[in-house]
């Protein structure tokens, strides 16, 4: 399917610890006015929901999307606002329902604990040595901007309850899902679970190296998934 030409605004939400700068680049493939929301680390989810409410009040029906927890919150808003949602662009889904066993939540809990124990500079230094160069640069910028409230944001993410399978099935908006097949923090199986449970969804895939070379591939992959939708039948065909 193609996003309606009447859709003039997209609201896109960063992942945990990330920022609007990355979200804006990740969804730069959208041919529409795109609002990348800067997270408030003291109230990440509430801030995201407020931003989508405000955009819909100002512009009518909107496209919503995000990365990781941003994708989950966008989908939550779409479930609550079916008549105000044109489509959902969901990049790198992290979990379904409870976050208890999710790798992304475990990573957030660990990082929050390390930040409180060792401080920002030490944790950033360790992160830079263990992460791909592109990811390290992104996170260093956003983590420093969100300090000293970053641990609070990470704790909130680690306890966020995403939509479960029953609620996913009630979402009426079409959903384009981008999954990185080599991402251990956002397992491809979670994207498959989302697509299987949603009423109208498709997946297209990419890799972490590709995202690192060009973050806009995330939004482009979501759009390719939307384009793959055929009526109401989910499409799970990979692109790799």
Image: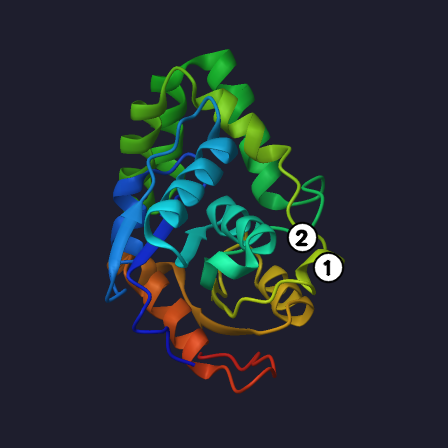
SS assignment at label 2: loop
- In the rendered structure, find residue 36 and report the number of the disc placed on it: none
Residue 21 location, x and y as percent? 25, 42
68 vs 198, left or right, is: left
Residue assigned mark 1: 165
53 vs 187, left or right, is: left
Query: Residue 161 appears in which quarter of the rendering?
Result: top right
Circle 2 crowding by C-alpha within 10 Å: few under 14, some 14–19, many from 20: some
User: Which is more N-terminal, label 1 or label 2?
Assistant: 2
| Contact flag, marks 2 and 1 (Cβ < 8 Å) | yes
Residue 126 location, x and y as percent? 39, 28
172 vs 19, left or right, is: right
SS assignment at label 1: helix
Can residue 185 be spotted in the picture?
no
Residue assigned mark 2: 96
Can residue 68 be spotted in the picture?
yes
């Amino acid at each position: 399917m193609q996003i309606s030409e009447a859709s003039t605004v997209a609201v896109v939400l960063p992942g945990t610890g990330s920022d609007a700068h990355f979200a804006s680049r990740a969804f730069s493939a959208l041919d529409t006015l795109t609002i990348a929301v800067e997270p408030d680390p003291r109230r990440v989810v509430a801030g995201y929901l407020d931003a989508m409410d405000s955009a819909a009040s100002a512009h009518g029906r909107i496209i919503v999307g995000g990365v990781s927890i941003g994708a989950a919150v966008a989908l939550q808003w779409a479930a609550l606002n079916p008549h105000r949602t044109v489509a959902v662009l969901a990049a790198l889904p992290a979990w379904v329902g409870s976050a208890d066993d999710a790798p992304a939540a475990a990573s957030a809990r660990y990082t929050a604990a390390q930040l409180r124990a060792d401080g920002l500079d030490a944790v950033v230094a360790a992160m830079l040595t263990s992460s791909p160069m592109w990811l390290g640069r992104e996170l260093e910028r956003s983590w420093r901007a969100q300090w000293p409230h970053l641990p609070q944001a990470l704790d909130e993410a680690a306890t966020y309850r995403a939509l479960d399978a029953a609620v996913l099935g009630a979402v009426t908006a079409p959903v384009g899902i981008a999954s990185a097949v080599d991402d251990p923090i956002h397992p491809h199986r979670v994207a498959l679970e989302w697509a299987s449970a949603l009423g109208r969804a498709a997946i297209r895939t990419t890799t972490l190296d590709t995202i690192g070379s060009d973050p806009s591939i995330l939004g482009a992959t979501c759009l390719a998934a939307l384009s793959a939708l055929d009526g109401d039948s989910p499409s799970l065909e990979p692109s790799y």
